[in-house]
Image (cartoon, helix red, strand yellow):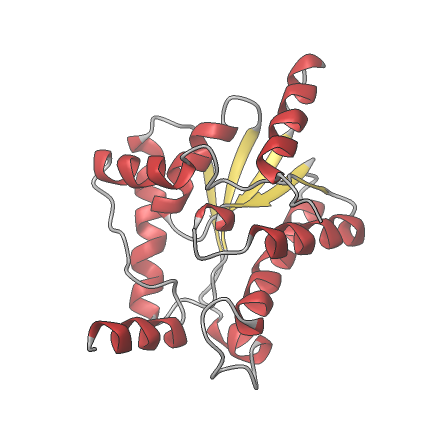
Amino acid sequence: MNKINYHKLMIAEIESIKSKGQRPKLVLHSCCAPCSTHVLEVLNETFNLEILFFNPNIYPKEEYHKRLQEQIHLIPKMELDIKVAKTDYESHLFYEKVKGLENLGEGSERCKQCISLRLEKTAMYAAENKFDYFTSTLSISPLKNADIINEIGQSLQDKYSVKFLIADFKKNNGFKNSIDLSKKYNLYRQDYCGCIFSKKERESKNNK
């Protein structure tokens, strides 16, 4: 079975939008400032963007606020005029979503449920605020499965009647560019995905 080229599909969608002379509204779920750098560069030319920072998985609370502030401070550094919509720190939503999956590792069903939680919130926000599209920075990470992200996004597209922008932002040197841009803008880059379980996994690997 041929693997779907999500990056190619995104480029085709963007070219179609440009050919019609449109500039639709897109809400971008961002997991953190470093991951959003490359994505913002890619999308800002085509869309009127807004960032939604909804990441109840992040542990501890201090880390959540540190990543949120870094996201807010990135926008003027990139000379962009983009609103960052933030939500309250609702970690209980994450723990409810992954109950019974806590001991599964990175890339497991636990991660899939976490992605689903964050993307559904983004789709709801997009529908409530009359956005044309929604998508996420998550696929820029080499540790995240683009198939899962895009499958969830497309299912939510049907549920909320807002188009999901298919993407695999790690492609075409996207991840490398995000690292270079993080250095350029002097951003804080965390060494674990966000949740307490990924933090413990990273600490366990570092101690070996």
Q: Eyeballing the image, is 108 above or below 102?
A: above
Indicate the quadrant where residue 10 lies.
Answer: top right
Indicate the quadrant where residue 81 lies.
Answer: top left
Point out residue 206 in the picture as x, y percentages from the top left corner. 22, 72
Looking at the image, residue 9 sits to the left or right of residue 183; the answer is: right
Image point 28% across, 60% down: which residue? 191
Q: Residue furthest front?
A: 1
Point out residue 50 in the picture as x, y percentages from the top left corner. 52, 38
How many tags in the picture?
Answer: 0
Q: Eyeballing the image, is 31 above or below 135?
A: below
Image point 57% across, 35% down: which residue? 7
Point out residue 162 in the picture as x, y percentages from the top left corner. 73, 43
Point out residue 36 in the picture as x, y percentages from the top left corner. 41, 42
Looking at the image, residue 148 sits to the left or right of residue 55; the answer is: right
* Rendered-image quadrant of the C terminus: bottom left
Which of the pair 16/129 is nearer the observer? 16
Q: Residue furthest bottom?
A: 100
Looking at the image, residue 100 sits to the left or right of residue 63; the answer is: right
Image point 57% across, 50% down: which residue? 146
Which of the pair 205/153 is nearer the observer? 205
